[in-house]
Image (cartoon, helix red, strand yellow):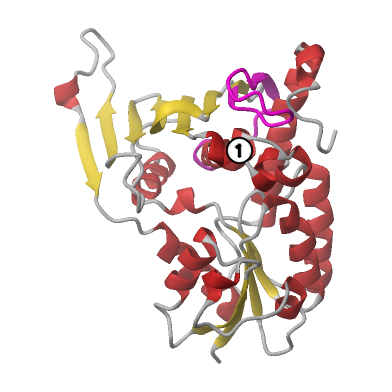
């Protein structure tokens, strides 16, 4: 049976998802789309509203590619209408809302998957497999930096409103790095210290920088995150250091090319001096972005075969939202006089 799909929101992400879906004409087809900007949907069968997608009896699955504040209500409405759902991040504004979504998911028994596509980048997949192999020992610490440069035009419309965006750079981009740290480390962080600021753009309730240090008290695994929209040159870097070596992903293959080449560097450690040198590293270069295709394949497998959601499950979404709550709560506790200007949504 060909899966009939409706897409709510047909901006950049909706179009990316549609393109990935069209590569599987034998498995699915996009039957209707909706966007408030009519020019984006020219030449496609359209619905008059989100409800027109969600309540269409001829649609089996809904892709939610909307502004942040619409993600939770649209996901819940689609699940209750008997649809399978694929939703972009952030899944919600806080962990409490995510628990509400999971309750509806459990009631309906429909597939729910979230768009944490960074897990599907080839360098990350390779890194994850190597870590899981055990040949490098256990993970000792991780360091992630993820930043982009934005202009004043970025902080307009719904992105400038904490009630509509839910937060700033942490929910927009840092959420991906946190998800990767949970994915690679395979354990939660129950101790968090963070500094959250909006020193440059000064948009009330929308942070432009987050520095966070996290630890799992039982294992001792530590991780640090810098999520920023004042990087001035786009940057992605994830470092994972283990007992018997290290792995570093620098760059991320994207259509814009602004994050540079996606390269995974790997080296064994040295028990005595000198330490590993640049020449000791094995470098793997990844020229193609396979993340969108891998995500669509997994979603279709889950719907068609009843396979569990391995990457982007609602449980994983809950875990990352719990961590985000702890980061915001840490700033609220340590600098309450500043936090009032950073984030109030869900508090």
Would residue 189 be counted in the magenta stretch? yes
Q: Quadrant of residue 171?
A: top right
Q: Residue furthest top?
A: 273
- Provide the secondary structure element on which disc 1 rests: helix
Relative to 25, residue 317 above or below:
above
Relative to 76, residue 198 above or below:
above
Instruction: Specify few, some or many for label 1: CA neighbours under 10 Å numbering under 14, 14-19, or 20 or more.
Output: some
The quadrant of the picture occupied by the N terminus is bottom right
x then y, percent, for residue 257: 31, 46
Looking at the image, which is closer to me, 84 or 257? 257
Tell me the residue at 40%/25% (across/down).
241
x then y, percent, for residue 180: 51, 41
Tell me the residue at 62%/51% (across/down).
89
Would residue 272 be counted in the magenta stretch? no
Q: Quadrant of residue 267?
A: top left
x then y, percent, for residue 48: 71, 78
Q: Is residue 136 visible?
A: yes
Q: Is residue 309 left or right of residue 54?
A: left
Provide the residue designation for mark 1.
Answer: 155
Q: Which residues are magenta?
A: 182-210
Q: Quadrant of residue 41?
A: bottom right
x then y, percent, for residue 307: 58, 71
């Amino acid at each position: 049976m060909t899966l009939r799909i409706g897409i709510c929101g047909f901006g950049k992400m909706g179009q990316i998802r549609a393109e990935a879906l069209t590569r599987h004409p034998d498995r699915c087809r996009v039957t209707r789309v909706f966007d408030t900007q009519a020019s984006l949907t020219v030449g496609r069968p359209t619905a008059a509203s989100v409800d027109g997608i969600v309540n269409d009896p001829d649609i089996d699955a809904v892709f939610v590619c909307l502004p942040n504040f619409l993600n939770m209500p649209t996901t819940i409405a689609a699940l209750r209408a008997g649809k399978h759902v694929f939703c972009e991040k952030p899944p919600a504004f806080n962990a409490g809302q995510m628990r509400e979504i999971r309750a509806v998911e459990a009631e309906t028994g429909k597939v729910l998957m979230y768009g944490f596509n960074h897990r599907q980048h080839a360098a990350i997949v390779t890194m994850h497999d190597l870590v899981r192999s055990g040949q490098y020992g256990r993970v000792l610490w991780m360091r992630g930096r993820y930043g982009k440069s934005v202009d004043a035009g970025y902080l307009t419309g719904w992105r400038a409103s904490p009630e509509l965006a839910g937060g700033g750079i942490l929910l927009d981009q840092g959420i991906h790095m946190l998800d990767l740290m949970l994915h690679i480390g395979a354990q939660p962080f129950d101790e968090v210290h963070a500094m959250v600021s909006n020193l440059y753009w000064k948009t009330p309730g929308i942070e432009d920088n987050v520095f966070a240090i996290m630890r799992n008290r039982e294992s001792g695994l530590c991780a640090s995150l810098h999520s920023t929209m004042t990087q001035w040159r786009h940057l992605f870097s994830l470092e994972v250091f283990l007992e018997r070596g290290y792995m570093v992903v620098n760059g991320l293959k994207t259509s814009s090319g602004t994050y540079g080449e996606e390269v995974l560097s790997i080296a064994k450690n040295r028990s005595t001096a000198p330490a590993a040198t640049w020449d000791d590293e094995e470098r793997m270069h990844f020229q193609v972005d396979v993340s969108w295709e891998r995500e669509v394949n997994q979603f279709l497998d889950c719907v068609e075969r009843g396979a569990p959601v391995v990457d982007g499950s609602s449980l994983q979404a809950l875990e990352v939202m719990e961590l985000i709550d702890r980061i915001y709560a840490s700033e609220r506790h340590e600098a309450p006089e500043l936090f009032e200007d950073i984030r109030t949504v869900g508090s």
